[in-house]
Image: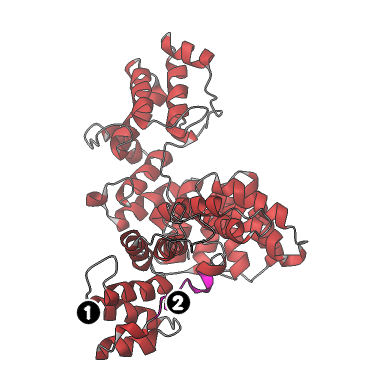
Amino acid sequence: MRYSLFGFLISFFLLALACNAEAPSKTPVFSKELLQKAESGDAEAQLEIATCYGEGLGVDKNQKTAFEWVKKSADQGFPKANLVLARCYLFGWGVTWDEVKAKKIFQEAEAGNPRAQDDLGNFFSGKYGRTEKKDVPRALSWWEKAAAQGYAPSQNKLGRAYSDGLGVEKNPQKAFEFFQKSAEQKNSGAECELGYCYRDGKGVDKDMVKAKQWFERSAGQGNPDGMASLGEFYQNGWAGTSIDLAKAIDFYQKAATQNHAWSQNRLGHFYWKGIGLEKDESKAFELFQKSAENGNMYAQNTLGMFYYNGVAPGAEKSKDPRKPAFRKKEFQKAFEWTRKSAENGNPDAQYNLAIFYWRGEGTEADLEKAKFWMAKAAEKNVPRAKEILGWITLDRNIKRISEDWFSLGKDSKEESSTNPQ
């Protein structure tokens, strides 16, 4: 599965918050000295403290506090802070969204500032909760203007648009060209995208060696997608890479600490089965939960089955060796996680959700919804789905469906498929 273009866009402040488009500043480091300097009225230090709070650099993330420091800096007339303040209002970062107060971004964009043009592309993409302003053609138009000036982030986003066919007709070759332009400027996201292109032969001849090289560049900059993709090379021994599970796990763990949902899910399976790591079911459950909360549809389905089968931590009530362990099954939680997975497109979860509706477990029985979801699973050739769809249609005896007919599916049961793009 490839992440959507708009899901891929920046979701927090970014280091570049405190930068203009042409001259990025150094990475700030939160310290008592820096805080004292900001509190004494140093406008530049105030903006650096804002960046620390916005990104969680040495301090817990807090967008409201970040905004307050940005405003203090801007109130002193610090040029960079004025533009950052406008961005806060544009995207609702730590403050109520206010398009009027964000007008400086529009003025800068019209004047040709590529960073501001990129901001407006993000704004009209519908990201940051501004779905009522979503206008994909307008977003693409602003990104095109910024990309024409060589602005790497916009080039990468246009590459994603052409790759996924979002607002434009799919064009793998054109996508590759935009990714290449952006990657040549060391954009870590584009470097990873080029890796996908070479790995999958999209827009260019398949070349696993070049794919690995681009993943290495991306991972070297701390990009979680790049690290997870590189981890696969060490896990599977692709392109002549020596299999090194410890190294693969190290990359997955580094990506997981950045809330990379796919890596969290894979590590969850490793801990659950004791693959390359000491078996730890509690740690596995924790990782599945984080992955599910971050939107991974395979982890969501796995979590649903954990609750259904009573294997979530704390479900085992009896510790008396003379008695069979009683496991508490939580049907409502099982249903909710399965529903999320099904709505995100997981065929196995669609199959499971149909059975929930047929049985009326965790929800009210609904034969029409059961048929709807089982039909979706059948379209994807989930085992038994066509057969059971016939049973549901004929309203045959539901007791014939045993619990072991629920499906984790190959992708969920083993780890999930290749690192999503």
Q: What residue appears at the point 32 percent right and 90 percent down from the top-left corner?
A: 390
What residue is pinned by disc 1? 368
What residue is pinned by disc 2? 404
Would residue 405 be counted in the magenta stretch?
yes
Residue 337 falls in which quadrant of the image? bottom left
Q: Nearer the viewer, mark 2 or mark 1?
A: 2
Closer to us: 6 or 162: 6
Q: What residue appears at the point 55 percent right and 56 percent down from the top-left corner?
A: 268
- Above-or-below relation of 16 to 317: above
Residue 319 visible here: yes
Give the overall secondary structure of the magenta segment: helix
Residue 150 visible here: no
- Cα gap from disc 2 to disc 1, whole angstroms: 23 Å
Q: What residue appears at the point 36 percent right and 62 percent down from the top-left corner?
A: 334
Q: Disc 2 marks which amino acid?
A: Asp
Closer to us: 293 or 91: 293
- Above-or-below relation of 252 to 406: above
User: What range is drawn magenta here?
Assistant: 402-411
> Element under label 2?
helix
> Element under label 1?
helix
On the image, the x and y values in percent for residue 36 come to 47, 11
Would residue 202 be counted in the magenta stretch?
no
- Above-or-below relation of 138 to 15: below
Residue 309 falls in which quadrant of the image? bottom left
